[in-house]
Amino acid sequence: MALKQYPAFLVLCSFLAFRALSKILSHLPLPQHVARDKTRTWRWRNLSVSMVHSLLTGTWALFCISEAPGMLTDISDGGTPLAFLLPCVSLGYFIADTVDMVANGQSRASWEFLLHHALVVPCFAYATVMGCYVSGAVIALLVEVNSVFLHMRLLLKLSNAQDSILYRVNKYINLLTFICFRLGAQLYLTGYLMWNLQTMPRGHCFLLPLLLIDLIMLVYLQRLVRADFVLWPWNMEGSKKKFLTD
């Protein structure tokens, strides 16, 4: 595959595509109460871009693994040509998302996402440049299956639709996919790497970021359960400027 020789070009194309998408979405109409608030307007647009990325890459990751299930048993493998493109696209998105947060003054409110991106970007960059651990990157991107419902949840909250049937249905699907695809994929990769650490080239460089992301995922799960399934009065409190609201 000729494009495999130019990972930086593929990442750049993805970066520009997601930046262009953000510009396009900024011209679309918004719910009235969202449009009145600058932070909510940015958050809506940012989440909409993230939703597009999740729909694309989550479906893509599932297809890649169904096409080549052997990737599950050798995460250091270079994967298929189609699989190689996936982390390139996601890497461009993560960089574009980081630029969006910083450029719009959302660094403090979005520090958890910036930390996540800081942990993921070097791993994906290594996979795309060196052409190895592509299978591991594809497995990691199974989390985007859950991200579809996680972003839907946040968009519904921004729309003040927490009492809608759609929100109630989504919260159960969100929890199920969180456990299966987000937490499950992360713990699978962590366990695989720990079990095979001695035979994995530069495996120790990936283990620490994985462990930190595992911790972040567990914190997110605790927040999700507390907010949607354990309705204490203080769940309604919190900063309106915070990007990832409970």
Image (cartoon, helix red, strand yellow):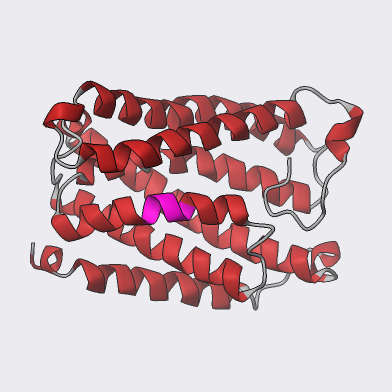
Q: Who is closer to the viewer here, 177 or 15?
A: 15
Dominant secondary structure (helix, strand or loop) of the stretch shown in magenta: helix
Q: Who is closer to the viewer here, 31 or 158?
A: 158
Q: Residue sitting at 24 percent across and 34 percent down?
A: 66
Q: Residue sitting at 31 percent across and 23 percent down?
A: 191
Report the side of 72 relative to 149 (left or right).
left
Q: Residue sitting at 73 percent across and 47 percent down?
A: 156
Q: Position of residue 162 (x, y in %)?
A: 80, 40
Question: In the displayed image of the protein, which residue is found farthest to the right?
Answer: 233
Q: Quadrant of the C terminus?
A: top right
- Which segment is the magenta one? 117-121
Q: Quadrant of residue 103?
A: bottom right
Q: Quadrant of residue 150?
A: top right
Report the side of 70 relative to 143 (left or right).
left
Q: Position of residue 89 (x, y in %)?
A: 33, 60
Q: Who is closer to the viewer here, 144 or 199?
A: 199
Q: Position of residue 139 (x, y in %)?
A: 31, 37
Q: Residue sitting at 49 percent across and 57 percent down?
A: 52
Q: Position of residue 124 (x, y in %)?
A: 30, 53
> Is there any visible trace of residue 62 in the rendered image?
no
Q: Quadrant of residue 29?
A: bottom right
> Is there any visible trace of residue 145 in the rendered image?
yes
